[in-house]
Amino acid sequence: MSSHRGRNAYRIGAAVALFAAALQVWMNLAVGIVGSEDNPVNLAFYLVVVTAAACAFTARFRADGMARAMLAVAGVQALLAAVIATAPSTVRDDPKGPLGVLALSAGFIALWLVSAALFHKAARNDPG
């Protein structure tokens, strides 16, 4: 029974991670996270998705490694948000301002953390 719960937690964790990555790319392409979609600062947000993919491959898609990987991705997202929100160009050029960037990034950080928690649950329920 715990193996079944572990598989479900893993699948939902993977779905949340894929949703976060797809949403971030889509938002960046459609309207841009900072300013417009043409703002070169937005390219940095693609690195979060690349980091997620690289970490997943490094973890060999195993639940325990994926939990740590998604936690690391949440950290990268938070660090990037802090750097961009405090940049003078964000204050000057982005209509949402620094708080908008931080709020949007907080949503993505929450998604990465939910994914990490689900992978952790999967690892705990199905260690093999």
Image (cartoon, rainbow, N blue to C red):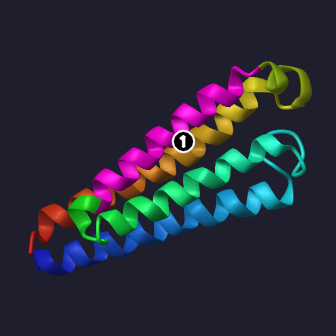
| Vertical position of residue 29 compared to residue 5: above or below | above
Q: Principal SS element in the magenta part?
A: helix
Q: Looking at the image, which residue is at 81% across and 60% down?
A: 29
Image-based side of 17 in relation to 68, left or right: right
Disc 1 target residue: 77
What crowding class fits label 1: few (fewer than 14 Cα within 10 Å), some (14-19), or many (20 or more)? Answer: many
Image-based side of 72 in relation to 49, left or right: left
- Tell me if residue 76 is in the magenta stretch: yes
| Vertical position of residue 72 compared to residue 100: above or below | below
Q: Looking at the image, which residue is at 25% across and 60% down?
A: 65
The quarter in which the N terminus is drawn is bottom left
- Tell me if residue 61 is in the magenta stretch: no
Corner quadrant of residue 39: top right
Q: Is disc 1 placed on a helix, strand or loop? A: helix
Q: Position of residue 8 (x, y in %)?
A: 30, 76
Q: Position of residue 34 (x, y in %)?
A: 80, 39
The quarter in which the C terminus is drawn is bottom left
Q: Looking at the image, which residue is at 76% across and 57% down?
A: 27
Q: Give the residues drawn in magenta, as a range.
A: 66-87
| Vertical position of residue 80 compared to residue 29: above or below | above
Q: Amino acid at mark 1?
A: Gln
